[in-house]
Image (cartoon, rainbow, N blue to C red):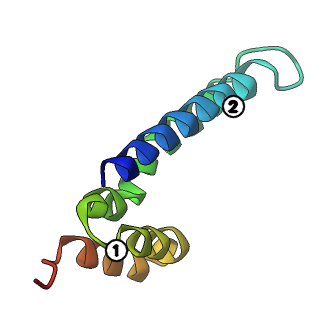
Amino acid sequence: MSTLRNRWFVTAIAAATFYVGWVIFLCVFEGDHRFHWDALLFSLVGILQGPFYLLPSIIGLRKRNVLAIFLLNLLTGWTGIGWIAALIWSVMKEAA
């Protein structure tokens, strides 16, 4: 299980690094070479919404079926019903 947590950590660091680079690109190099505050604000909102969207997957990291919870969250979480289903699944106790 520790290998899986290490993979999640490395993936999160890689995604954050890519996202920060993309924000810098959007804010500085968007055609007219001026700093764009709207791109920065949009990016900050995205950074804050990301962990909330993946909350069921983060809670379910210690579950046996973490991959299934993550896929349900990722693929159907945008519907709201899928996000709630993934959240419920991630907080339920596992059968012994």
Q: Is residue 69 above or below residue 32?
A: below
Residue drawn 16% across the image and 79% down it = 94
Q: Which mark is residue 27?
A: none
Q: Is residue 92 above or below residue 46?
A: below
28 or 75: nearer the eye?
A: 75
Mark 2 Cα within 10 Å, few/some/many (few <14, many 20+)?
Answer: few
Q: Which mark is residue 22?
A: 2
**Residue 50's x, y, as percent?**
46, 49
Q: Split into 4 quadrants, where in the image is the N terminus?
A: bottom left
Mark 1: which secondary structure? loop
Q: Would residue 45 appear left or right of 57 to someone viewing this image?
A: right
**Residue 64's x, y, as percent?**
28, 71
Mark 2: which secondary structure? helix
**Residue 23's x, y, as percent?**
65, 29
* Numbered disc in front, either 1 or 2: 1
Query: Which image quadrant is residue 32 in?
Result: top right
Q: Is residue 41 visible?
A: yes
Q: Is residue 38 visible?
A: no
Residue for badge 1: 65
91 or 61: nearer the eye?
A: 61
Residue drawn 10% across the image and 83% down it = 96
Outermost residue on the right side: it is: 31
Outermost residue on the top side: it is: 34
Residue drawn 42% across the image and 80% down it = 82
**Residue 73's x, y, as percent?**
44, 70
